[in-house]
Image: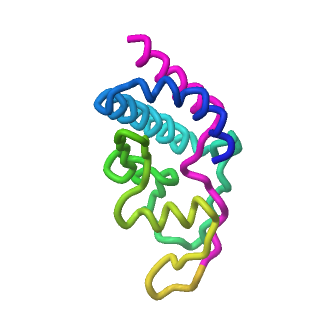
Amino acid sequence: MNELKPFEDKLAGLLAALSPAGRRRLTVEIAKKLRQRQQQRIKSQKAPDGTPYAPRKSQPIRAKKGRIKREMFAKLRTNRYLKASGNDNAAVVEFTGKVQRIARVHQYGLKDKTDKNSYTVQYPSRPLLGLSDDVLSLVETTINIHLSA
């Protein structure tokens, strides 16, 4: 969180002047915009730094016929699983429910079982959530627009 320290210091005085209800409205708006930006980035299959995700492991030649694989994380990025919330002090974008485990495995490149009775697989790191410079500038412009209104 050291990268956010100068950003927080610059806006701390301005945000302290807002009422709790005003801060709550602002954080909810920021969280929604962050979720939208994260969903777009996950859809384009890119990490927060702009590098593409590691591709899927190639499937065996004699795999089941008729099975069409969709893009990675298609359901995971929906509003049902990727929640945005805000309160007086924080804007939060997080995965909820059972998909938290899946997201954590892919975010950090951990080991996991593909099925209950299968063997353990090492997944490559595919960061789903993260902050980049354009996201920080989006947050800053959102705060400026909110404060000027």
Judge whether 104 appears above or below 17 on screen. below
Magenta segment includes 145? yes
Residue 1's spot in the image, x, y percent? 63, 47
x 47%, y 23%: residue: 143
Residue 97's spot in the image, x, y percent? 34, 63
Magenta segment includes 148? yes
Residue 141's spot in the image, x, y percent? 52, 20
Left or right of 50, for residue 104? left
Left or right of 52, for residue 45? left
**Disc count in the image?**
0
Q: Point out the stretch of residues depicted in magenta.
A: 121-149
Q: Nearer the viewer, residue 87 or 39?
A: 87
Q: Residue furthest top?
A: 149
| Quadrant of the image containing the C terminus | top left
x 45%, y 28%: residue: 15
Judge whether 143 appears above or below 102 on screen. above
Quadrant for residue 48, please give it: top right
Quadrant for residue 41, please give it: top right
Left or right of 135, for residue 98? left
Judge whether 67 appears above or below 134 on screen. below
Q: Nearer the viewer, residue 26 or 110?
A: 26
Q: Nearer the viewer, residue 65 or 54?
A: 54
x 65%, y 56%: residue: 55
Q: How are the colours assigned in the image?
A: rainbow
x 45%, y 57%: residue: 68
Residue 147's spot in the image, x, y percent? 43, 17
